[in-house]
Amino acid sequence: MNRIVLSDKDRGFGQIGGAPLLKDLSLWPANPQTGGLMTPVLTLTEQFQPAHFVPPGMAITVFLAVEQQQGGGFSRPLQRRYTVNQQSELQNVIKGGFARVILHELASQPLQPGNPPLLLERAFIDFKEMTDEEHDEEHEDEDSGIDLSKPSGRPCWLQDPIYEPPRYMFMMQLVDADVAEASPQHAGLFGEGIGYLFVDMQARRGKEGDDAGFFFIQFT
């Protein structure tokens, strides 16, 4: 079992923050309220998981509609738009448009638009084996995992359990503290919650710009 650590070296697994590795600006999702570009939070390549849910040469990028308030912090009402508190809200999260997960070709250079949205500092993803204590905590309870950033494993359910549709598989858990480590000025982006990425197992047959899954946050 591995946990996620941040690195200044590109291991080819993906990145937190930075500008997206898109080839075409038209693929960049827009905030459904303002029409402005959404903030790229996470990019994962085909090498992130041994099971290949991403076609060769492509990647998955997670975008959030983010609004930073004057004096720091983030809009609490907007954060609620990409969070889940009850299982019944899951379909609304997928269709709500405030978090988008798209499949795209992996560009060699980040795309820098003329009027960029709020961007996080970039940090590359690496893996580190869990300690014995972390491993024991991960397997202590059949319903909840450990509350650290990790690929796969079990989601650390903070509130009500979410039973995902059968097409989707839990792929990654990202904690607010790691986002803040990568980009300190964005501490609290998840409202001190944990972000969960579920990938569509049919994404392996997807094309440029297709939805590749869904991302939501549970507050602590």
Image (cartoon, rainbow, N blue to C red):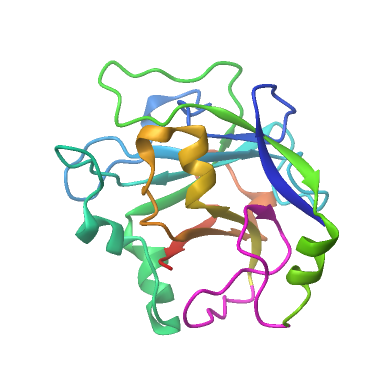
Residue 144 sits above or below residue 215 on the image: below
173 to the left or right of 51? left
Residue 154 belongs to the span the image colors magenta: yes
Q: How many marks?
A: 0
133 to the left or right of 68? right
The picture places residue 114, in percent across and down from the top left corner, at 28, 15
22 to the left or right of 154? left
Nearest the eye: 107 or 154: 154
The picture places residue 64, in percent across and down from the top left corner, at 37, 47
The picture places residue 67, in percent across and down from the top left corner, at 23, 43
Residue extending furthest toward the front: 133
- Quadrant where the N terminus sits is bottom right
The picture places residue 213, in percent across and down from the top left corner, at 54, 57
At 72% from the left and 82% from the top, the residue drawn is: 141
69 to the left or right of 3? left
At 68% from the left and 70% from the top, the residue drawn is: 145
At 76% from the left and 62% from the top, the residue drawn is: 134
At 40% from the left and 84% from the top, the residue drawn is: 88
Nearest the eye: 48 or 203: 48
Residue 58 belongs to the span the image colors magenta: no
**Which image quarter: residue 105?**
top right
Would you say the magenta stretch is mainly helix, strand or loop?
Answer: loop
- Quadrant where the C terminus sits is bottom left
- Residue segment shown in magenta: 142-166
**Which image quarter: residue 28?**
top left
Residue 153 sits above or below residue 185 on the image: below
Nearest the eye: 174 or 81: 174
**Which image quarter: residue 219?**
bottom left
